[in-house]
Image (spheres, grey):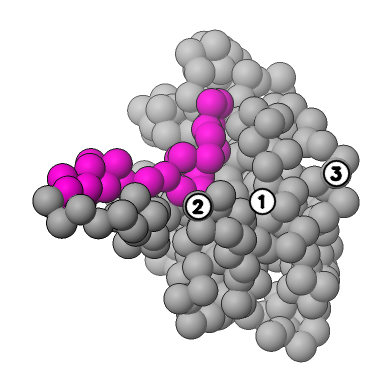
Amino acid sequence: MLPSVEATAQALAQHAYIADTGLSTSLFLALRMGKALLLEGEPGVGKTEIAKVLSRVFDTPLIRLQCYEGIDISQAVYEWNYPRQLLALQSSARDDDDGRSEAIYSEHFLLKRPLLQAIDQANSSAPILLIDELDRADEEFESFLLELLSDFQITIPELGTLRARHRPIVIITSNRTRELHDALKRRCVYHWIDYPTREKELAIVCCKLPGISQRLAAQVVDAVQTLRRHELAKNPGVAETLDWCEALQHLNARELSPELVLATLGVVLKYQDDVDKLRGGLINELVQEGR
């Protein structure tokens, strides 16, 4: 267990994740209090990356549940392996075994999905459970999570209630396409991850891409910071900043130019309306901003 907020920030930094005091404090408290950490913010600001880094910090498995509209228990928790059960019934039919119908409802025929894997008693240590983009799931599925987050247990009618020997470290992310229920939020430590300041974003780039020139990194960060001040359909996140820098490295670029910006628009902008806006007078502003 991490002993302090400072140690939490240092542990993340050792794995190339730069966290401010607010995020480090929220994570430290979530770990100490045994609560889930609920991270909200725009796409591409590093919410999912937190779970990946924690998996490396604690040297423990990362179990990821990617949420989407219509996800249900069979995809998130468990389902029975019906073909295998049927084969078992057919092979034992000749034995006239009265207990065979009960035997097929055993863990041997259980397909464990991410939520059940996270509390599987066979785990030797607490895994990291990432529930990614929960806002994409239906409200009914969100309500189902309450039992898991309250008691870290899952009830399977045929087997009973399975409880976690080691409480998983739970990270929940949301892009806030809809509001999550208050009942779920009460079970979490909440933190909003905003777009980083120029200084923090430049530090992230230099940490993730140590071979990049300071001048090019500063130009790209200044350009992205400028883009976020305009009304775009989709503001670029830190992920796009890193992708843009990496793309420019592959092109052996030393500094930004209008020609390079136009050639690499598809790395940083994902909507044609935003591309058209950049092709206007904004492109010169981006290049001048970084000089």
Does any portion of residue 166 appear in the rendered image? yes
Front position in the image: 70 or 291: 70
The numbered mark, 2 or 1, whose residue comes first in the sequence reads 2
Density class for disc 1 (Cα within 10 Å; few <14, some 14-19, many ≥20) is many
In magenta segment, residue 188: no
Front position in the image: 52 or 169: 169
Picture coordinates of residue 174, whole percent (x, y): 68, 40
Density class for disc 2 (Cα within 10 Å; few <14, some 14-19, many ≥20) is few
Q: CA distance from mark 1 to mark 3?
A: 14 Å
The residue beneath circle 2 is: 158
Determine whether 279 is above or below 85 in the image. above
> Which residue is found at the position 60% from the left and 40% from the top?
133
> Which residue is found at the position 55% from the left and 52% from the top?
156
Picture coordinates of residue 237, whole percent (x, y): 60, 40
The quarter of the image holding the C terminus is top right
The residue beneath circle 3 is: 183
Determine whether 266 is above or below 168 in the image. above
Q: CA distance from mark 2 to mark 1?
A: 29 Å
Q: Is residue 260 left or right of residue 188?
A: left
Secondary structure beneath label 2: loop
Find out whether the residues at labels 3 and 2 contact each other: C-beta distance under 8 Å: no
The numbered mark, 3 or 2, whose residue comes first in the sequence reads 2
Secondary structure beneath label 1: strand
Residue segment shown in magenta: 67-93
> Which residue is found at the position 68% from the left and 47% from the top?
145
The residue beneath circle 1 is: 172
The quarter of the image holding the N terminus is bottom right
